[in-house]
Amino acid sequence: MTLTRAGSLWAALAAAVALGALHLLAPAIRRRLPVPIHAATSLGGGIAAAYVFLYLLPRLAEGNQAVAHVLEEEVTATPARGFVLFLVALVGFFTFYALERVTHRSQQRRQEPTRLVFGFQLGFFALYSGLITYTLATKLDAGLGPAVLFAVAMGLHVLATDGVLAEHFPVSLTTGWRLVLVAGAAGGWVTAVAVQPTGVLMNVLTAFLGGGILLNVFVDELAPERHSSLTWFTVGLVAYSGLLAFATFTTDVGAA
């Protein structure tokens, strides 16, 4: 099902509101989960891993070809031009990794990280939410099914990331500061309304976001020191892989 531009923006607004509510209600949601928190985190980790390997990486490969085609007219051919988006994803991975290490170093000294570190983490998480809502509008232009799968994966991923942020900053992360995250989600939608992204820009933003997702999957959601559940991880991995396979199959059949 393909939506009009206006329909995509309205659907993206609903998703932005849901994401903002998720930021505000995340602590209450975690307290009322029908399964232990580690099980829910493992479930989200399985879903995020399936999303990365079966959806994100193939899209990066496709997008990289498009970016390289655009650069053919502007940049002299070099080996680096063939993996521009993967380099952007690596930059995203490194950026979020650097923030993670600064936070972890403070925790090793048995103290909550400084307000400056908290500000950087909060700001990047707000940017993260903004990128999700900004890119979602364009994904809705391509079809409702892929956008819903993206929204589900990102919603669970945001919930898990919020839990890690709350663990790092148990004192600083108050409801008032959570409004910054809500503003980030809203800002992404407003930007999508004001500036319709080009294909190249969307590929670059998706690559940067993908680098952050990869880091959070490997470091936060699948960290060996965390109490995790192989069963729930497998459930998330298999279920979401099945949904992605079904969506891909039905899209290919419809296109044929």
Image (cartoon, grey):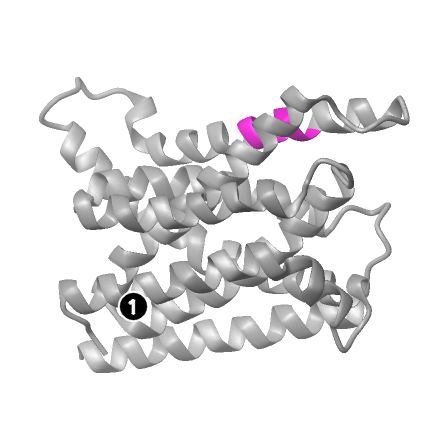
Q: Position of residue 148 (x, y in %)?
A: 39, 70
Q: Residue furthest front?
A: 176
Q: Residue at 80% x, 23% y: name it.
A: 106
> From the viewer's perspective, is residue 174 above or below residue 231?
above
| Residue at x 19%, y 72% (from the top left corner) | 3
Residue 71 among magenta residues? no
Image check: 153 left or right of 26? Answer: left
- Residue 73 figure quarter: top left
Res 50 visible: no
Does the magenta run of residues contain 96? yes
Q: Is residue 106 visible?
A: yes
For mark 1, what is the residue?
A: 11
Is 219 or 38 nearer to us in this picture? 38
Give the quarter of the figure containing the N terminus. Answer: bottom left
Quarter of the image with the C terminus is bottom left
Q: Residue at x 57, y 35 (%)?
A: 122
Query: In the rendering, at what x and y percent does residue 43 appear?
Result: 68, 67
Q: Main secondary structure of the magenta part?
A: helix
The local secondary structure at tag 1 comes to helix
Tell me where the magenta segment starts and ends, as one range: 94-100
Which picture quadrant has residue 136?
Answer: bottom left
Are there few (<14), some (14-19), or many (20+) residues within 10 Å of tag 1?
A: some
Q: How many marks?
A: 1
Q: Percent from the top left, x then y, of residue 67?
A: 23, 37
Query: 73 left or right of 153?
Result: left
Which residue is at 42% across, 80% downward? 246
Who is closer to the viewer here, 115 or 176?
Answer: 176
Q: Nearer the viewer, residue 144 or 166?
A: 166
